[in-house]
Image (cartoon, grey):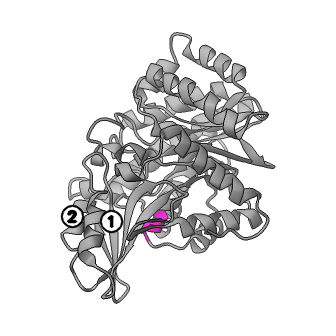
Amino acid sequence: MQISPGLHLTYCSNIHAGESWKEVFDALNENIPLIKEKLSLTKPFGIGLRLSDAAAKEMLSGGNLIKFRKWLAENDCYVFTLNGFPYGGFHNTVVKDNVYKPDWTTSERLIYTLNLIDVLSELIPESSEAGISTSPLSYKPWLNNSCNAIDVFEASAINLMKCVVELYRVRKYAGKYIHLDIEPEPSCLLESSKETIDFFNEYLIPYGRDYLKYSLNLPLEICESIIRDHITLCYDICHFSVEYEKPAEVIKAFQSAGIKVGKVQISSALKVITNKHNNRNEILNQYQLFSESVYLHQTIVKDALGLLHHFNDLPEALKHFYNPEFHEWRTHYHVPVFMLSYNELQSTQDDILEVLNILKKNKFTNHLEVETYTWEVLPKAERLELKESIIRELGWVINIIINEKNCSH
């Protein structure tokens, strides 16, 4: 939904289980009308659609796109962003590092993304903007001597350019602007602002300019402009919070590097402060409730000297919980954005508030998406009814955006 001029807000439908198009559509049909009634009764409601590879293929066959466009019109809804990160199963199965498969070196990831471009280009009207968030190339623990980072950077840059060629054609011939939004994430090949900027400067732009010059027969400077328009950033607030990166510095760094933010995913990580004044036994008991077997929960710990220690999952990190030098813990866990604390545990909600305050003064994106896909694996005591939780999260963001004063708790 448009909550201020040119600024669209939604929630990501990956909170609903469903891998086939039928399952996805049934979840939308069950939830969207009721959520819209509470939040956007008289205005069109924007949808953030997550499609698996299987669902995307199904959308492109059997008249499903035509039927869905009819449903959108009948329910006064529109799609402005797709989540193209998880390729396969994302609920009711062990996901862990499978969420990064296939990576951007593969034809499977490329074909999946091209299918998403086809779907989105059929769903949006002419002269509109939409985006597709995607994975941060690959997963660091997979890299070894036979598959080093340089090989992955080079292969990923070329596959991304194949998408840019299609995005350029959609814009030129259909008048529809779609960008592909790379989403940095802890433990991935692109996890920090520096790594992302370095990838743009050292691989994406130089390799991409040459590729587009040959493919489109355009001058190099035009090719670079096309790349920067169509490969943008998905700034997931939770991910950068886990990295201890401050929002103002992240946004400034990307703007200085000429990297656009296609979408902000509004999300909150877990935060734990340990010191001599609190009871580590009680904190650990509460922390362990969030250690579960479906998703990776990368954890980064800051020690007394300010050094960061990276763990690929929460159980691995908790083995070191009694280390007296470890003072702050941040865990990749998309907890409801309206929650500031969970007994002895806290959230990184302050970073969300800072991003939204910056957005009021510096409109660096047009797309906002609340993403709390871990609702199903939250401890039961922290879990509201699903539609109630979605409505409360979106309402919380709307209240902050329309408030002219600085955000506060």
Label placed on residue 128: none
Q: Is residue 246 magenta?
A: no
Question: Residue lying farthest left?
Answer: 319
Mark closest to the chain's N terminus, 2 or 1: 1
Camera-nearest residue between 279 and 374: 279
Q: Secondary structure at mark 1?
A: strand
Give the alpha-carbon distance from disc 2 to disc 1, as whole Å: 9 Å
Camera-nearest residue between 216 and 385: 385
Residue at 56% over, 55% down: 266
Type of amino acid at the residue the image marks with label 1: Thr
Q: Residues within 10 Å of mark 2 (few under 14, many from 20)?
A: some
Start-end of magenta stretch: 239-243
Residue at 30% over, 64% down: 287
Q: Residues within 10 Å of mark 1 (few under 14, many from 20)?
A: many
Residue at 33% over, 65% down: 299
Label 2–label 1 contact, CB within 8 A: yes
Q: How many marks?
A: 2
Q: What percent of the width, then of the height, locates residue 336?
A: 49, 54
Camera-nearest residue between 375 and 212: 375
Tell me if residue 382 can be seen: yes
Asked if 76 appears above or below 39 in the picture, the reply is: above
Residue at 35% over, 89% down: 305
Instruction: Judge from the rendering whether residue 317 lies leftward or rightward of residue 330; answer left or right.
Output: left
Camera-nearest residue between 234 and 115: 234
Q: Which residue position is annotated with label 1? A: 299
Q: What percent of the width, then of the height, locates residue 329?
A: 35, 72
Q: Which residue position is annotated with label 2? A: 316
Q: For residue 345, which quarter of the picture?
A: bottom left
Q: Secondary structure at mark 2?
A: helix
Q: What percent of the width, then of the height, locates residue 161?
A: 52, 44
Main structural element of the magenta stretch: helix, strand or loop? helix
Type of amino acid at the residue the image marks with label 2: Glu
